[in-house]
Image (tube, helix red, strand yellow):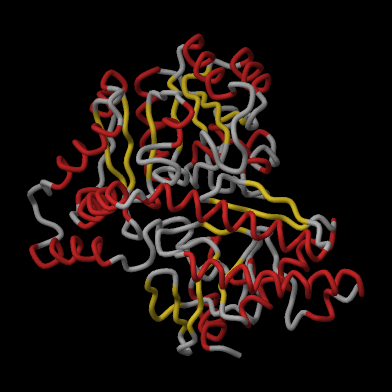
Amino acid sequence: MNSGIKLWNKAKKIIPGGNSLLSKRPERFLPDQWPTYFKKAKGCEIWDLDGNKYFDFSYMGIGANILGYADPDVNRAVKKVIDSGSMSTLNAPEEVELAEILLKLHPWAHMVRYGRTGSDAAQIAVRITRAYTKKDKVAFCGYHGWPDWYLAANLAKKSNLDGQLLPGLKPLGVPRGLQGTAIPFHYNKIDELKTVVKKHKIGTIIMEPVREYEPENNFLQKVRQIANKAGAVLIFDEITSGFRMNPSGAHAKYGVIPDIVLYGKGLGNGYPMSVVVGKKKIMDSAQDTFISSTYWTERIGPAAAIATLKKTREKNVPKHLMATGKAITRGWKTSAKKHGLKIKTFGIPPLAHFSFQYGNQNQALLTLFNQEMLERGFITTNAVYTSYAHKKPIVNKYLKNVDEVFSILKDAVDKNDIKRRLKGPIADPTLKRLTSK
């Protein structure tokens, strides 16, 4: 048993769920074999507690590291503010500098507020819009974190959030009085939003402008029109998509302007930072309600964000992320076709995904894929969040190994012995309580 699994079994005894982020649980990747913890991370390489080195061709810090791990330019900026003091009774001037940069990238906007996580930003934004519109009800599409306003959707129907990214989310601990205040609609299904707005007094429409699929039939434009007609504030949650397709948000690519846009994850390249960017008349409502936190004023996050945005522009990082994602997707398709393996690819190029098309064998196949790729020195899943550190030579090495593994998977399918080839349990994507062994 590797050191990571030993430590994970200890963690489950003293940390509920083992850690604070569901997406990093080893049971979701390769139970009883996953390295789980890292000693060092640099570029797109990770070293585990036993000193083994892997190339990360999975989530890259769950989408946080668009430049790669421990980027020297971002680290230099962070070390500078650490040495000169990351917190004091006075405010960090970097807050103003970052605001000016963000507003220059978004000429339609006038003000910003800061948080440190994506859920912070989503919670802040909805509080602001409710204060502005004086309407409680929120229509949403996509994943928006763990705030009460979001999980409240499952008070009315326990499966309301199933189609929004993570199925099975339980609203335990969310006040029952919030029932009926958050109503879902699905991406590219404009009639669902029309029905929601017709039945409810909606003050806020919050959605991811793009994630797994591109908008169809002017979907985003129609959402904008519905928001205008209903007098609702339109929020685009770009916590995940932001700065990957172009120097600002994905919404700019599609030519649809929201009232508020949210950024996080890649904004600080691994350092906690999130932001709410919006129009003045709406953002001013933040002063009419209480939104305040000590660590939203620390200095490291803004310094990291400034350095990240500067490098993203100077190196044209979105162009690299797009090209890399397209190359990986082509590689998946080519290898799958070569070996007769049935897969489906989807997602915007910087957040490339694939899925196996074998019904109830899909999860076992993914587990076997992760197992075989790990043995070849790669941290994987059925997605690659591309980074600036994913250079062509290592991408080619990844795809060469994918080709070998896809051949093994097809042989396992043909011989109907997928489970026999696994060295541990099948990965479990469901949400469940975790206990130590």
Indicate the position of residue 149 as horizontal and vertical percent values: 50, 36
For this rendering, which residue is in front, 115 or 151? 115
Q: Is residue 278 above or below residue 268?
A: above
The correct choice, above or below, for 37 with respect to 334 in the image is below
The quadrant of the image that shows the N terminus is bottom right
Q: Identify the residue shown where x is 47% and y is 62%.
A: 60
The residue located at (20%, 43%) in the rendering is: 98
Out of 124 and 300, give the one closest to the viewer. 300
Reply above or below: 253 against 402.
above
Please give the name of the residue rendered at 54% of the width and 14% of the height, measured from the top-left corner: 226
**Residue 100, position as x, y percentages in the image:** 19, 36
Q: Is residue 253 above or below residue 337?
A: above
Quarter of the picture containing the C terminus is: bottom right
Residue farthest top in this picture: 229
**Which residue is drawn at the image coordinates 54% and 32% (left, top)?**
177
Which percent across, then down, holds residue 40?
A: 38, 78
- In the picture, measured across the screen, residue 71 lies left or right of residue 137, that is left
- Which of the 4 image quarters holds residue 332? bottom right
The number of numbered badges drawn on the structure is: 0
Q: Quadrant of residue 383?
A: bottom right
Position of 255 with respect to 114 (left or right) is right
The image shows residue 9 at horizontal and vertical percentages of: 57, 81
395 lies left or right of 77: right
Which of the pair 301/195 is nearer the observer? 301
Residue 44 in which image quadrant: bottom left
